[in-house]
Image (spheres, rainbow, N blue to C red):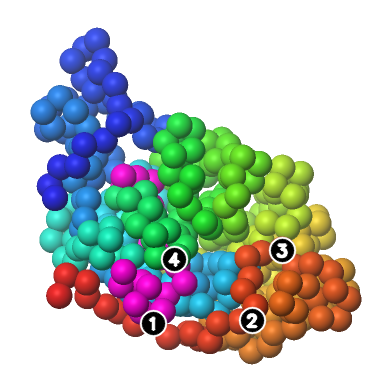
Amino acid sequence: MDAYPTRYWHALDDDRIQCDLCPRFCRLREGQRGLCFVRKREDDRIVLTTYGRSSGFCIDPVEKKPLNHFLPGTPVLSFGTAGCNLACKFCQNWDISKSREMDTLADGASPEKIARVAAESGCNSVAFTYNDPVIFHEYAIDIARACREVDVKTVAVTAGYVCPEPAAEFFRYMDAANVDLKAFTERFYKKICGGELQPILETLQYLKHETGVWIETTTLLIPGENDSPSELEAMTGWVVDNLGPDVPMHFTAFHPDWKMRDTNHTPARTLNLARKIAMDNGVHYAYTGNVSDEAGGSTYCHECGSMLIGRNWYDLTHWSLDEAGRCNTCHSPCAGVFEHGPGHWGRKRLPIRLSA
């Protein structure tokens, strides 16, 4: 489908139309596209140009999203489209998120087919990932509705840069979200991402206090940009004060990419320090990522310190939770969404084609 009608826009007095999906508020004349590239003014309305089209589908471990407390060990059908409403200079998926070529969208499927394939493939969930799903808002919601019909859950991997009204509609249909908390300064968001921090914080607070969506956060630590101890102190303190200690935080390693190829890799000591600062500030579950670190990737009981879930990359190596999700040692609950036991998908990555 080339042009799917959308709702979040209004006409301006100067003959432009303003897109109201995200805080960027792109103002468009006929034929123009927003910064996200996929929402376009056509016939005096804003349409979505990527409905039903994808850059590819792959069955992944849910831990890769990353989600460590949402159905651990289970497979998730992952896919994205093209475009993004931020302009992060360090984007690790820039070939998809910054694509201006519709040929990127080589695969496609109806919402019903995606839900059916997920269920038939044994996937417990479908993840909207690789690029930000808020920009294909209508398609993601229709997929989530179809997934509910076949008892498959949905996961949004998002930067959270979305306005309150469309956010409420979007997250009404999501079961889990990993929100990129990219930094904790407006300077970083403006200079590096072309956006703002405050709307992200508002999205996180909304998710925590107004929905039943399971949330985790991820921060890609970039040397010299967002990795200072003072910024990490402020960020993790804000999470505990505003979201509570049970929201897991992931601190992941940067590797040089796109417009930041001259920036160094993140040292392991920076990841370990971030994790320590988070836990010292009261975060119950803090993780390191994009590195081989079984200790930093495993889940521990916040009461007695026992290992609850051991992880070697995306392989589960240890499980010590009872059927109610409590520590087998001290019986304290572990926050999360758990089934009766761990899944066994491991670290496998299985690309699939739906259009065939």
Q: Secondary structure at mark 4?
A: loop
Mark-to-mark CA distance, 1 and 4: 19 Å
Question: Which is nearer the N-term, disc 1 or disc 4?
Answer: 4
- Figure quadrant of residue 194: top left
Mark 2 residue element: loop
Other residues around mark 3 within 10 Å, as few (<14) / some (14–19) / many (≥20)? some
Q: Is residue 105 visible?
A: yes
Can you say whether 77 is above or below 132 in the image? below
Of badges 2 and 3, nearer the viewer stands 2
Q: Amino acid at mark 1?
A: Arg
If you read the primary sequence from the N terminus, does the residue marked by circle 2 or circle 4 appear first? 4
Q: Which mark is residue 152?
A: 4
Residue at image mark 3: 335
**Of labels 2 and 1, the one closer to you:** 2
Which label number is shown at residue 341? 2
Q: Which residue is mark 1?
A: 349
Magenta-span inclusion, residue 271: no
> How would you rate the neighbour count of disc 1 (Cα within 10 Å): few for under 14, some for 14-19, many for 20 or more?
some
- In the rendering, at what x and y percent does residue 112 appear? 28, 61
Q: Are marks 1 and 4 in contact (CB under 8 Å)?
A: no
**Residue 125 highlighted magenta (yes or no):** yes
